[in-house]
Image (spheres, grey):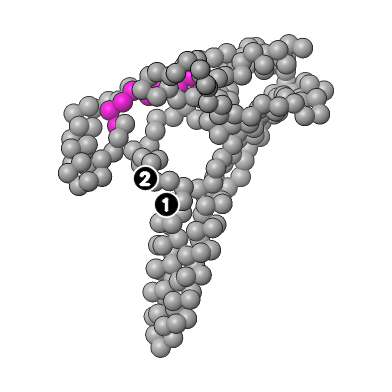
Amino acid sequence: MHKEKKYELYTENGSLIFRTSSFRDEKTSVLHSGVYTKEFSSMLSASAVSVLAYMLMNNIMEELKTAAYITAIASFVAVFIGARKFIFRDTFLEVDFNRSKRTVSIHRPGILHSTSEEIPFDQIQSVEIGSRKFIPENLDGIDFVQKISAQHGSAVPGLNETEEFITLRLILSDGSERTIYAVKLNGGNVNGEPDIPLNEIKRFLDS
Protein backbone atom coordinates (compact mmCIF):
# COMPACT_ATOMS: atom_id res chain seq x y z
CA MET A 1 0.00 0.00 0.00
CA HIS A 2 1.31 3.42 -0.95
CA LYS A 3 2.76 5.55 1.81
CA GLU A 4 2.99 9.26 1.35
CA LYS A 5 6.52 10.44 2.07
CA LYS A 6 6.65 13.80 3.83
CA TYR A 7 10.39 14.10 4.15
CA GLU A 8 13.69 13.99 2.27
CA LEU A 9 16.53 11.74 3.40
CA TYR A 10 19.79 11.63 1.49
CA THR A 11 23.56 11.43 2.00
CA GLU A 12 25.87 14.27 1.07
CA ASN A 13 29.64 14.47 1.67
CA GLY A 14 29.50 11.74 4.29
CA SER A 15 26.53 13.30 6.11
CA LEU A 16 22.95 12.06 6.37
CA ILE A 17 20.54 14.94 5.69
CA PHE A 18 16.95 14.77 6.92
CA ARG A 19 14.55 17.51 5.77
CA THR A 20 10.83 17.85 6.43
CA SER A 21 7.98 20.32 6.76
CA SER A 22 6.17 17.96 9.18
CA PHE A 23 7.89 18.65 12.48
CA ARG A 24 5.20 20.28 14.68
CA ASP A 25 3.18 18.02 16.96
CA GLU A 26 0.73 20.77 17.85
CA LYS A 27 -3.05 21.09 17.96
CA THR A 28 -4.41 22.29 14.63
CA SER A 29 -5.54 25.91 14.65
CA VAL A 30 -9.27 26.69 14.36
CA LEU A 31 -8.28 28.74 11.32
CA HIS A 32 -8.92 25.85 8.97
CA SER A 33 -6.04 25.35 6.53
CA GLY A 34 -8.50 24.63 3.74
CA VAL A 35 -9.69 28.24 3.95
CA TYR A 36 -6.83 30.19 5.49
CA THR A 37 -4.11 29.11 3.11
CA LYS A 38 -0.76 30.88 2.99
CA GLU A 39 -1.84 32.64 -0.21
CA PHE A 40 -5.14 33.79 1.30
CA SER A 41 -3.42 35.05 4.48
CA SER A 42 -0.88 36.94 2.36
CA MET A 43 -3.72 38.45 0.32
CA LEU A 44 -5.51 39.64 3.48
CA SER A 45 -2.34 41.29 4.75
CA ALA A 46 -1.66 42.92 1.38
CA SER A 47 -5.26 44.17 1.13
CA ALA A 48 -5.10 45.81 4.56
CA VAL A 49 -1.84 47.58 3.75
CA SER A 50 -3.00 48.71 0.29
CA VAL A 51 -6.24 50.19 1.69
CA LEU A 52 -4.25 52.04 4.33
CA ALA A 53 -1.80 53.30 1.70
CA TYR A 54 -4.67 54.53 -0.49
CA MET A 55 -6.32 56.38 2.41
CA LEU A 56 -3.05 58.07 3.38
CA MET A 57 -2.20 59.09 -0.18
CA ASN A 58 -5.74 60.29 -0.84
CA ASN A 59 -5.64 62.51 2.26
CA ILE A 60 -2.25 63.94 1.37
CA MET A 61 -2.93 64.51 -2.33
CA GLU A 62 -6.69 64.48 -2.73
CA GLU A 63 -6.46 65.96 -6.23
CA LEU A 64 -4.13 63.15 -7.40
CA LYS A 65 -6.38 60.10 -7.15
CA THR A 66 -4.44 58.31 -9.87
CA ALA A 67 -1.30 58.43 -7.74
CA ALA A 68 -3.27 57.05 -4.80
CA TYR A 69 -4.54 54.14 -6.90
CA ILE A 70 -1.06 53.38 -8.22
CA THR A 71 0.37 53.47 -4.69
CA ALA A 72 -2.36 51.12 -3.43
CA ILE A 73 -1.76 48.62 -6.24
CA ALA A 74 2.02 48.73 -5.81
CA SER A 75 1.63 48.27 -2.04
CA PHE A 76 -0.66 45.26 -2.56
CA VAL A 77 1.78 43.54 -4.93
CA ALA A 78 4.84 44.25 -2.77
CA VAL A 79 3.22 43.19 0.51
CA PHE A 80 1.65 40.06 -1.03
CA ILE A 81 4.98 38.86 -2.42
CA GLY A 82 6.86 39.80 0.75
CA ALA A 83 4.33 38.19 3.09
CA ARG A 84 4.19 34.96 1.09
CA LYS A 85 7.98 34.74 0.89
CA PHE A 86 8.96 35.78 4.41
CA ILE A 87 5.94 35.48 6.76
CA PHE A 88 3.59 32.82 5.35
CA ARG A 89 6.35 30.84 3.67
CA ASP A 90 6.76 27.08 3.57
CA THR A 91 9.06 26.15 6.44
CA PHE A 92 11.35 23.13 6.76
CA LEU A 93 13.32 21.58 9.57
CA GLU A 94 16.70 20.21 8.53
CA VAL A 95 18.84 17.78 10.50
CA ASP A 96 22.45 17.14 9.47
CA PHE A 97 23.97 13.94 10.89
CA ASN A 98 27.66 14.63 10.28
CA ARG A 99 29.75 11.49 10.59
CA SER A 100 33.16 13.19 10.34
CA LYS A 101 32.38 15.72 13.09
CA ARG A 102 30.29 13.19 15.04
CA THR A 103 27.62 15.83 15.56
CA VAL A 104 23.94 16.37 14.75
CA SER A 105 22.98 19.88 13.63
CA ILE A 106 19.29 20.77 13.90
CA HIS A 107 18.14 23.83 11.97
CA ARG A 108 14.65 25.03 12.95
CA PRO A 109 12.81 27.75 10.99
CA GLY A 110 11.58 30.86 12.78
CA ILE A 111 9.45 33.85 11.86
CA LEU A 112 12.42 36.07 11.04
CA HIS A 113 15.39 33.72 11.17
CA SER A 114 16.18 30.08 11.83
CA THR A 115 17.83 28.68 14.94
CA SER A 116 20.52 26.02 15.01
CA GLU A 117 21.61 23.51 17.60
CA GLU A 118 24.59 21.15 17.48
CA ILE A 119 24.57 17.94 19.48
CA PRO A 120 27.50 15.47 19.73
CA PHE A 121 26.75 11.87 18.77
CA ASP A 122 27.77 10.65 22.23
CA GLN A 123 25.00 12.74 23.82
CA ILE A 124 22.30 10.97 21.81
CA GLN A 125 21.07 8.10 23.96
CA SER A 126 18.56 6.74 21.45
CA VAL A 127 16.30 7.50 18.50
CA GLU A 128 12.70 6.57 19.25
CA ILE A 129 9.20 6.66 17.84
CA GLY A 130 6.64 8.23 20.15
CA SER A 131 3.11 9.59 20.05
CA ARG A 132 1.22 12.63 21.21
CA LYS A 133 -2.54 12.99 21.45
CA PHE A 134 -4.73 16.07 21.75
CA ILE A 135 -8.18 15.37 23.20
CA PRO A 136 -10.67 18.25 22.76
CA GLU A 137 -11.96 19.88 25.95
CA ASN A 138 -15.24 21.70 26.56
CA LEU A 139 -17.25 19.72 23.99
CA ASP A 140 -20.40 21.72 24.75
CA GLY A 141 -18.62 24.94 23.84
CA ILE A 142 -17.24 23.35 20.65
CA ASP A 143 -20.72 22.19 19.60
CA PHE A 144 -22.06 25.69 20.19
CA VAL A 145 -19.31 27.26 18.06
CA GLN A 146 -19.91 24.76 15.25
CA LYS A 147 -23.68 25.44 15.23
CA ILE A 148 -23.16 29.20 15.07
CA SER A 149 -20.52 28.81 12.33
CA ALA A 150 -22.77 26.51 10.29
CA GLN A 151 -25.64 29.02 10.48
CA HIS A 152 -23.35 31.63 8.96
CA GLY A 153 -22.13 29.30 6.24
CA SER A 154 -18.59 29.07 7.60
CA ALA A 155 -18.37 25.74 9.40
CA VAL A 156 -15.09 24.99 11.17
CA PRO A 157 -14.31 21.27 10.72
CA GLY A 158 -12.23 19.20 13.11
CA LEU A 159 -12.84 21.14 16.35
CA ASN A 160 -14.26 18.13 18.20
CA GLU A 161 -11.86 15.56 16.76
CA THR A 162 -9.05 13.93 18.71
CA GLU A 163 -5.70 14.58 17.03
CA GLU A 164 -2.86 12.11 17.35
CA PHE A 165 0.69 12.40 16.07
CA ILE A 166 3.38 9.77 15.57
CA THR A 167 6.73 11.39 16.28
CA LEU A 168 10.40 10.68 15.69
CA ARG A 169 12.55 11.93 18.57
CA LEU A 170 16.18 12.13 19.54
CA ILE A 171 16.51 11.18 23.21
CA LEU A 172 19.53 12.85 24.83
CA SER A 173 21.62 11.63 27.75
CA ASP A 174 20.44 14.53 29.95
CA GLY A 175 16.83 13.28 29.67
CA SER A 176 15.68 15.92 27.18
CA GLU A 177 14.41 15.13 23.70
CA ARG A 178 14.22 16.74 20.27
CA THR A 179 11.24 16.03 18.01
CA ILE A 180 12.42 16.06 14.41
CA TYR A 181 9.37 14.55 12.69
CA ALA A 182 5.63 14.43 13.42
CA VAL A 183 3.00 12.67 11.31
CA LYS A 184 -0.66 13.39 12.01
CA LEU A 185 -2.96 10.39 11.96
CA ASN A 186 -6.16 11.27 10.11
CA GLY A 187 -9.07 10.50 12.41
CA GLY A 188 -6.78 8.30 14.50
CA ASN A 189 -6.11 5.95 11.59
CA VAL A 190 -3.66 5.63 8.72
CA ASN A 191 -3.69 3.40 5.66
CA GLY A 192 -0.83 1.15 6.64
CA GLU A 193 2.09 2.23 8.80
CA PRO A 194 3.35 5.83 8.62
CA ASP A 195 6.65 6.16 6.79
CA ILE A 196 9.23 7.10 9.44
CA PRO A 197 13.00 6.84 8.75
CA LEU A 198 13.86 5.38 12.15
CA ASN A 199 16.00 2.47 10.97
CA GLU A 200 17.94 4.54 8.43
CA ILE A 201 18.93 7.12 11.04
CA LYS A 202 19.78 4.52 13.68
CA ARG A 203 21.98 2.59 11.25
CA PHE A 204 23.84 5.78 10.30
CA LEU A 205 24.46 6.73 13.95
CA ASP A 206 25.62 3.22 14.83
CA SER A 207 27.95 2.82 11.84
Q: Per the image, is 145 magenta?
A: no
Taking the spot 72% from the left edge, 15% from the top edge, the residue there is 205
Looking at the rendered image, the quarter that the C terminus falls into is: top right
Q: Per the image, is 164 magenta?
A: yes
Closest to the observer, 37 or 159:
37
Q: State which region is magenta.
A: 159-168
Residue 13 position (above or below residue 80) = above
**Based on the displayed image, in which of its 4 quarters is residue 93 positioned?**
top right
Hey, what amino acid is under mark 1?
Answer: Phe
Residue 119 in view (yes/no): yes
10 Å crowding of disc 2: few (<14), some (14-19), many (20+): few
Taking the spot 54% from the left edge, 58% from the top edge, the residue there is 81
Q: Disc 2 marks which residue?
A: 35
Q: Position of residue 92 (x, y in %)?
A: 59, 36
Q: Disc 1 marks which residue?
A: 40
Disc 1 + disc 2, Cβ < 8 Å: yes
Q: Position of residue 200 (x, y in %)?
A: 67, 16
Q: Which of the two labelled residues, at mark 1 and mark 2, occupies the earlier sequence position?
A: 2
